[in-house]
Structures are given as structure tokens and as C-alpha cells.
Image (cartoon, rainbow, N blue to C red):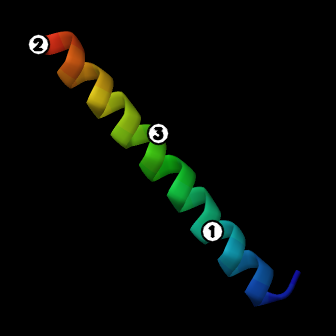
Amino acid sequence: MNMKTFEMREKRLAEILGAKVLWEFYQCCNRGN
């Protein structure tokens, strides 16, 4: 595997993880209110 695809995959994973965390946080806030 060359570095380029690895970097792209890493970035993609980071985006998915970030979105998941944001979504969890958002739902927690909504449940709190």
C-alpha cells in the first residue's frame, strides 16, 4: 500500500470518527434539555 491511499484512509476515518463524536454529543445535549 502506498502512502497516499493510507493518508486518504486515515483522513476518512478521522472524519467518520469526528462526525460520530459530534452526533453523540448532540444527542446528549438534546436529551439533557
- Residue under numbered circle 3: 20
Residue 19's disc number:
none
Q: Quadrant of the N terminus?
A: bottom right
Report the Cα–Cα distance between label 3 and label 1: 15 Å
Which quadrant of the structure image shows residue 23?
Answer: top left
Q: Position of residue 29 (x, y in %)?
A: 19, 23
Residue at x 50% of width, y 48% of height: 17
Three-letter amino acid code at the position of disc 3: Lys
Judge by depth and name the residue closer to the eye, 30 or 12: 30
Residue 21 lies, with reference to residue 25, above or below; the image says: below
The mark closer to the camera, 2 or 3, is 2
Q: Earlier in the sequence, mark 1 or mark 2?
A: 1
- The reply to whether the C-beta atoms of the residues labelled 3 and 1 are less than 8 Å apart is no
> SS class of the residue under badge 1?
helix
- The reply to whether the C-beta atoms of the residues labelled 2 and 3 are less than 8 Å apart is no
Residue 21 lies, with reference to residue 26, above or below; the image says: below
Residue at x 43% of width, y 51% of height: 18
Q: Earlier in the sequence, mark 3 or mark 1?
A: 1
- The reply to whether the C-beta atoms of the residues labelled 1 and 2 are less than 8 Å apart is no
Q: Position of residue 30 (x, y in %)?
A: 22, 18
**For the residue carrying disc 2, how many other residues have a C-alpha within 10 Å: few (<14), some (14-19), or many (20+)?**
few
Residue 20 shown left or right of residue 21 in the figure: right
Residue 15 shown left or right of residue 25 in the figure: right
Residue at x 11% of width, y 13% of height: 33
Residue 12 shown left or right of residue 31 in the figure: right
Q: Position of residue 2 (x, y in %)?
A: 84, 87
Tally of numbered tags: 3
Report the Cα–Cα distance between label 2 and label 3: 20 Å
- Residue under numbered circle 2: 33
Report the Cα–Cα distance between label 1 and label 2: 35 Å
- Residue under numbered circle 1: 10
